[in-house]
Image (tube, rainbow, N blue to C red):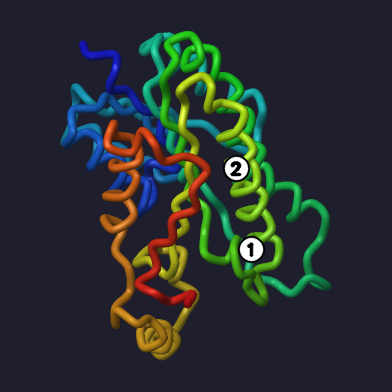
């Protein structure tokens, strides 16, 4: 077993997370994929890649679940090659309608879990002087979005964390980067009507909605040795939507 090509992916049951898992597996990686509720999606990946994909159920709002997730990963793969934090939850509300519990739960998944998982994986990466950390953030973390102030703030926090980590971990040969998707075909956009989705499409210079594979391709590149001199970057994948 090639322990060099190992990756922990959170949110592996989602449209983007699943595409990232498949892309990494296709490049020879062994993937531990975290999921919470969508068991059918990870079962499909396990059936398709029984020797390469290892699903693990964890509620990222719970510290104890996050600890069990990283323990499972380290038990099976002592050397952590890469970590992709794709798990995320959204909140579409006005600020005055948002309560503190909702804010805390969203930040627990979108930001706190990334912090705690990275902290657990770093000893392995530092000891081998190598590692790739990739955070899936959002264009809204860069420009903000009405009705999604808490979500945008959590993604912005993740980007700031990545930049700081890039400086902190650079001497250890570890890169840290953010991939910032725009509007991507996924269940997260199910709340929008067909007309609204068409408006988003027409607002995109490249004239289409993004595909999960668009994000997955970039993640695999950032995890490769071709990206060894790229760190602290926020790379937007939105077809020009945020221009």
Q: In this rendering, would 177 be left or right of 161?
A: left
Q: Residue at x 19, y 26 (%)?
A: 50
Residue 136 location in percent, x, y? 47, 49
The residue wearing badge 2 is 163
Which callout, 2 or 1, points to the residue nearer the camera?
Answer: 2
Q: Quadrant of residue 21?
A: top left
Q: In terms of secondary structure, where does tag 2 sit?
A: helix
Q: Residue at x 41, y 45 (%)?
A: 38
The residue wearing badge 1 is 91
Q: Residue at x 24, y 27 (%)?
A: 29
The CA span between labels 2 and 1 is 25 Å
Q: Is there a contact, CB below 8 Å, between mark 2 and mark 1?
A: no
Residue 102 location in percent, x, y? 74, 55
Q: Residue at x 21, y 11 (%)?
A: 1
Residue 6 location in percent, x, y? 32, 23
Q: In terms of secondary structure, where does tag 1 sit?
A: loop
Q: Quadrant of residue 68?
A: top right
Mark 2 or 1, nearer chain start: 1
Q: In this rendering, would 7 be left or right of 52?
A: right
């Amino acid at each position: 077993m090639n322990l060099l090509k190992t990756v922990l992916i959170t949110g592996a049951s989602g449209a983007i997370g699943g595409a990232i898992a498949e892309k990494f597996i296709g490049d020879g990686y062994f993937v531990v994929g975290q999921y919470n509720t969508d068991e059918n999606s990870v079962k499909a990946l396990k059936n398709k890649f029984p020797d390469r994909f290892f699903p693990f159920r964890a509620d990222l709002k719970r510290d104890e679940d996050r600890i069990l997730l990283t323990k499972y990963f380290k038990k099976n793969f002592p050397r952590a090659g890469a970590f992709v934090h794709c798990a995320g939850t959204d909140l579409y509300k006005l600020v005055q309608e948002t309560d503190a519990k909702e804010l805390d739960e969203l930040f627990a998944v979108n930001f706190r879990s990334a912090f705690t998982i990275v902290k657990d994986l770093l000893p392995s990466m530092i000891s081998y002087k190598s590692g790739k950390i990739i955070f899936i953030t959002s264009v809204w973390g860069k420009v903000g979005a009405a009705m999604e102030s808490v979500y945008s703030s959590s993604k912005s926090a993740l980007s700031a964390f990545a930049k700081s980590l890039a400086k902190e971990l650079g001497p250890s040969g570890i890169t840290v980067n953010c991939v910032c998707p725009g509007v991507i075909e996924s269940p997260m956009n199910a709340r929008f009507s067909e007309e609204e989705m068409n408006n988003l499409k027409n607002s995109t210079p490249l004239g289409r909605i993004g595909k999960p594979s668009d994000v997955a391709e970039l993640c695999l590149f950032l995890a490769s040795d071709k990206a060894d001199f790229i760190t602290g970057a926020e790379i937007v994948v939105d077809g020009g939507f945020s221009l």
